Every structure is written in C-alpha cells, then in structure tokens.
Image (spheres, rainbow, N blue to C red):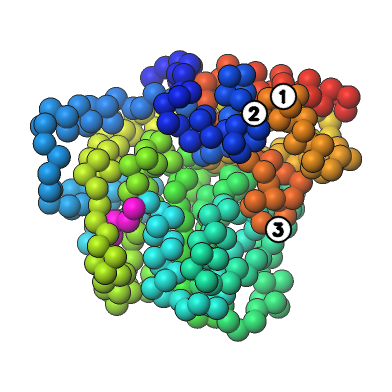
C-alpha cells in the first residue's frame, strides 16, 4: 500500500477538506486540514473489492442483516486482540455516536449525571447534553507527561445522581492507552457506585509498536453485567461514512432493552456498512492495518520530533491513534494568538482543545493520518509560525 500517495480530496464532499474553511477560516487551496479524525489514504483493497462485488450484483435491495458481519467482528477481536466475544451479544447501530445517544436514552433519565474524563472526545458532551442528561467532568491529571485518572477526587465529588460512566479507550484526544490495572480500578469504582460502564474502544486497532491495548472486558470480565463495549471499523479503515457501529452487551436483560429501543426507532444496519465491515475484518484487512500502523508510527515520530524543536510547545507522548495532542501553555500567548498563528501563518486547521472539555483549553489536536510529505510540511509551517520562540 502506498500511503505516500497524495489524493486530492478537495471538492469531493469530504468534511475534513470541504468544511475546513468554515471551521478554521483556512482555504483548502493552500491549507492543511488536521481536525476531523479522518484519514487521507486510499481505501484498502479489501474494501474496494467489496464495493466492486456489491456493484456487480447490480441490486441493492433488502438483505439478511448483520449476522455475517458480527461473525467477522468476533473473529477480528479474537485474532487481533484476544477478546473472545459472542456474536449473539452484538447489536448494530448507525455509528457509535448513535449508539451512545441510544444508550443514554434507554438506561438513564433526564437530569441523571454521566461521568466523563476530560479532556475527551467532544461528542461525549454533545450527546449527554442533547439527551438532557448532565455532564459530570472528572478532569484528568498529567503525571510524567501523560494523563492519569484521579478516582479519589472523582469519588469525593460525587453527587449521588451519577448513573453512568463513559470512557474513551484508547483515549481521544491524547492517545493514552489505559492499563489493565487502571481499567480494573474503573470496574471496581462502577461496581461500588452502581454505575453502568460504556467503553468506547473505536481506536483499539491503532496501537503503536511496543504498546499493548486491553479491551475493558478482558481486564474486568466480572463487570460484564454492567458494561457496554462500543467498537467499529470506521476509524481503523476510514469507513465513517458507512455509519455502522457495534455495541456488545453481555447482560441479556440490558441487551433485550437495547434491541427493543432499536426496534422502536426502526434502526437497522445498512447494506454498505455491513459489507465494508465484513470485508475489513479479514486476513487481508489485518495485513493492511499492519502496514497502516507502521506508517502512522513514522508520521507520529516525525511530528513529535518537529514539535520538540519548538521550545515552548509540548506534545503528549502518543501510545495510539493518529491524533497528536499539543500544549501551547508555555508560549505565554493567549489561545487567540496561538490560533491566529496556526491558522493565518501556518495555514493549518487542527481541532481546538477547549472543545474537549476541562483541561483542553491550552491544547490543539493535530490529525497526522495523511501522507508523510504533508506531515513534514505541517511541521515546517509550525516551526516558522513560532520561530520567535526558538
């Protein structure tokens, strides 16, 4: 796979490219979008073959559903991650954002509090607030350069209205992989306070060499009765437009309620998403992912090395994902000036850290899943934009 190939996505309906000017004020004519978690690489051959097979049928009518896809998901989790999951415990949703919203609506009530560890993926807060629930922020603390959860502080600040905990694992935006011990501590916390655990594990395949990801239920199998695990091929294979996610629910009573909610909302998996996911979770897909992760590892090293040459900027070490989390606090500038330099001088559009909640105010998130030449160009532009700090 040639990940160095430059593909012109401008004018193709790509949110990342065609909405960058609306989001960051930078034209795609000369700007580099580094905001939306979307990759700029050509689709894997296994996906293209699946699409061609679908086209060759020349018919897009009703189909049996997600049974074969769920078998493929189970195979992938077992082969790639050592997670032995029962396909009968899976349900399909229209992406994981939809899954989170439906879980909130089904198992909590308006006014209930949902714990999230901030800074974290902004859609957690959006979904909690859209469903009239209340965000309970548990700010992460930085120790030895990486994030840690402060469960003592969280426990001391509980109101008694908390009903659910929602985690990003691996963590978005910082790429932190929670250890088996940390996940077990979360399990014990949820048991102690009778909380439902929702583990969003969408970045689980994008793990750099030398790092190990552990699925929540592999770390804490005793928590199966209160846990929802969210997975999808969409980040690994860049198939977000297909809008299919998988929710694994071991508890039969919780699973029955969730499937009833899907039925009431008339939610069923779509043919395109099912076929793409089934094709992705295959030996051919595995080989492609191995190449992808090796390439992303090179990109992340290039980007972090370049950021390290700007004295006042601090990039958090990346253990996974393709999202670099950079702190501008030591520049002595307010974030308005930081963004002016990043947008107007460097012509880059990263994600604004404040959108990720408490603790993200001085950060920007940079998507490095793009050909290496663009990553190198972005580094050079940032170094020039902050040359006066060097």
- In the rendered image, residue 1 lying in the magenta stretch gets the answer no
Contact check, label 2 and label 3, Cβ < 8 Å: no
| Earlier residue among tags 1 and 2 | 2
Q: Which quadrant: the N terminus?
A: top left
Q: Which callout, 1 or 3, points to the residue nearer the camera?
A: 1
Q: Mark 1 sits on what residue?
A: 346
- In the rendered image, residue 92 lying in the magenta stretch gets the answer yes
In depth, the one of 54 and 30 nearer the eye is: 30
Give above or below for 20 relative to 379: below
Q: Mark 2 sits on what residue?
A: 26
Label 3, secondary structure: give it: loop
Instruction: Calculate the distance from the C-alpha at mark 1 to the C-alpha at mark 3.
Output: 26 Å
| Earlier residue among tags 2 and 3 | 2
Residue 19 in the image, given as x and y percentages of width and height: 53, 34
- Label 2 CA crowd tier, 10 Å (few <14, some 14–19, many 20+): many
Label 1, secondary structure: give it: loop
The magenta span reads 90-94
The structure residue drawn at horizontal position 46% and vertical position 76%, both measured from the top left corner, is 108
Instruction: Calculate the distance from the C-alpha at mark 1 to the C-alpha at mark 2.
Output: 10 Å
């Amino acid at each position: 796979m040639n990940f160095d190939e430059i593909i012109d996505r401008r004018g193709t309906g790509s949110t990342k490219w065609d909405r960058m000017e609306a989001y960051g004020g930078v034209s795609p004519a000369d700007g580099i979008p580094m905001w939306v978690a979307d990759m700029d690489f050509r689709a894997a051959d296994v996906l293209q073959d699946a699409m061609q097979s679908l086209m060759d049928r020349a018919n897009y009518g009703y189909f049996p559903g997600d049974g074969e896809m769920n078998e493929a998901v189970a195979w992938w989790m077992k082969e790639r991650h050592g997670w032995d999951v029962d396909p009968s415990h899976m349900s399909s949703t229209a992406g994981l954002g939809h899954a989170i919203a439906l879980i909130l609506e089904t198992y909590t009530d308006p006014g209930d509090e949902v714990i999230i560890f901030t800074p974290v993926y902004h859609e957690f807060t959006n979904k909690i607030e859209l469903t009239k629930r209340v965000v309970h922020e548990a700010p992460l603390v930085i120790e030895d350069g990486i994030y840690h959860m402060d469960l003592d502080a969280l426990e001391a600040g509980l109101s008694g209205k908390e009903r659910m905990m929602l985690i990003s694992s691996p963590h978005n935006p910082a790429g932190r992989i929670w250890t088996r011990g940390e996940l077990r501590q979360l399990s014990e916390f949820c048991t102690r306070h009778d909380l439902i655990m929702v583990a969003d594990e969408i970045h689980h395949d994008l793990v750099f060499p030398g790092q190990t990801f552990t699925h929540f239920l592999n770390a804490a199998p005793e928590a199966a009765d209160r846990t929802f695990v969210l997975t999808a091929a969409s980040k690994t294979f860049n198939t977000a437009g297909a809008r299919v996610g998988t929710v694994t629910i071991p508890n039969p009573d919780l699973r029955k309620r969730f499937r009833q909610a899907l039925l009431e909302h008339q939610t069923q998996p779509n043919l395109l998403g099912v076929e793409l996911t089934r094709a992705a979770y295959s030996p051919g897909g595995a080989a492609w992912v191995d190449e992808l992760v090796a390439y992303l590892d090179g990109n992340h090293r290039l980007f972090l090395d370049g950021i390290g040459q700007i004295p006042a900027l601090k990039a958090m070490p990346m253990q996974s994902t393709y999202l670099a989390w950079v702190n501008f606090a030591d520049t002595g500038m307010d974030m308005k000036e930081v963004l002016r330099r990043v947008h107007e001088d460097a012509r880059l559009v990263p994600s604004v850290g404040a959108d990720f909640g408490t603790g993200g105010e001085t950060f920007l998130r940079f998507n490095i899943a793009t050909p290496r030449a663009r990553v190198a160009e972005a580094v050079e532009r940032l170094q020039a934009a902050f040359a006066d700090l060097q």
